[in-house]
Amino acid sequence: MSNSSSQINRRRFLETASVATAAATLAPNLFAAPSQSSKAETAVQEFYSSLNDQQKSQICFDFNHQLRNKINANWHITKPTIGLDFYSDKQRSMIDNILRGITSEDGYARLQKQMDEDDGGVGFYSVAVFGDPSTEKFEFELTGRHLTLRADGNSVDKAAFGGPIVYGHGEEAPSENLYHYQTQQTNEVFKALDKDQRQKALLQAIPRENAVQRQGKNGNFSGLEVGSMSDDQKELVSETLDVLLAPYRDEDKKEVKTILKGIGGVDQLRMAFYKKGDLNNDKTWDNWRIEAPGFVWHFRGAPHVHAYINIAAVS
């Protein structure tokens, strides 16, 4: 990438975050986020309206039900899977519209390939609806092998993606894993570090993959402070975040950037890479973590990808 292109990308990132934060400051209800009228949320409302009483009894819950807060790299939130006769073809099409609505074009294609290769396709995954989409608070959730996705119309206030989400891929060969490109991108940051910075960024043991509770302003964060990096290195971190966010819809990307701006921007992030689990012993660090107050992006790339995102505004 040329220097001029990098500068443009960096400027766009900062301008977008600055505009979103200004809007949120002037009018909290304009906080950049999906709404009940967003594409995915409209499809959730249509899906919910199509459910009969028997279906609702098995896949619908109160908004504050404990299942909504559970995260795991391999679980089913409800027993009926999408491919069963439990759902009509029209309802399966609605679910597909929801998935299209919460992903970018490339993200949707990766999602379909991941579900096909990991568990035989979307028909082997499960969904749930929390709350009533005709009221103020609701959330749609899809789970299965290496996947937890949400659509909530900003019912969970200032929480990106509607709460913690999970993605991954069971292919162990880096060249075949759908998300290894994210490891390659984050390692571009590592390559740009000097010797002293690498010593701070490269750690021995990776935390438990589900240890992704958000830490507040007084949290204990490991790794290298992005704020201590040079401007060029910070620019590379911003470009890396854009790559990581690429599979998701624009509204979720904007919400993440607004939240990040609210905690002080990329300077507040810590980046950690882990020696354990270096596939092929090539010093391309397959396990890594980006963290800050209210921000966790945990990527376990060995033996295959389990990744967790948990980002929300810090009060």
Image (cartoon, rainbow, N blue to C red):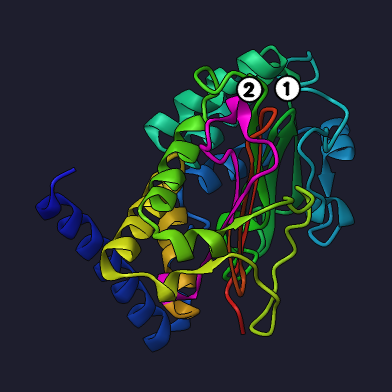
Q: In this figure, what is the number of numbered marks?
A: 2
In the rendered view, tell whether residue 66 sits above or below residue 285. below
Using residue 218 as the reference point, say whether residue 78 is left or right of it.
Answer: right
Task: Classify mark 1: residues with Cα within 10 Å, few (<14), some (14-19) or many (20+).
Answer: many
Using residue 28 as the reference point, say whether residue 52 is left or right of it.
Answer: right
Identify the mark at residue 131; answer none if there is no mark: none
Say if mark 2 contacts mark 1, CB within 8 Å.
Answer: yes
Where are the magenta residues, as a range? 265-289
Return the residue nearer the eye: 51 or 308: 308
In the rendered view, tell whether residue 91 sits above or below residue 229. above
Q: Is residue 61 visible?
A: yes
User: In the image, what residue occupies the spot 68% across and 62% down?
Assistant: 137
Q: Position of residue 6 (x, y in %)?
A: 19, 53
Pointer 2 residue:
92
Return the residue nearer the eye: 195 or 148: 195
Q: Type of residue at label 1?
A: Ile
Return the residue nearer the eye: 49 or 80: 80
Q: Which image quarter holds the C terminus?
A: bottom right
Query: For residue 174, which quarter of the picture?
Result: top right
Q: Position of residue 278 (x, y in %)?
A: 63, 35
Identify the mark at residue 82; answer none if there is no mark: 1
Measure the alpha-carbon separation of dots 2 and 1.
7 Å
Q: Position of residue 182 (x, y in %)?
A: 47, 39
Q: Type of residue at label 2?
A: Arg
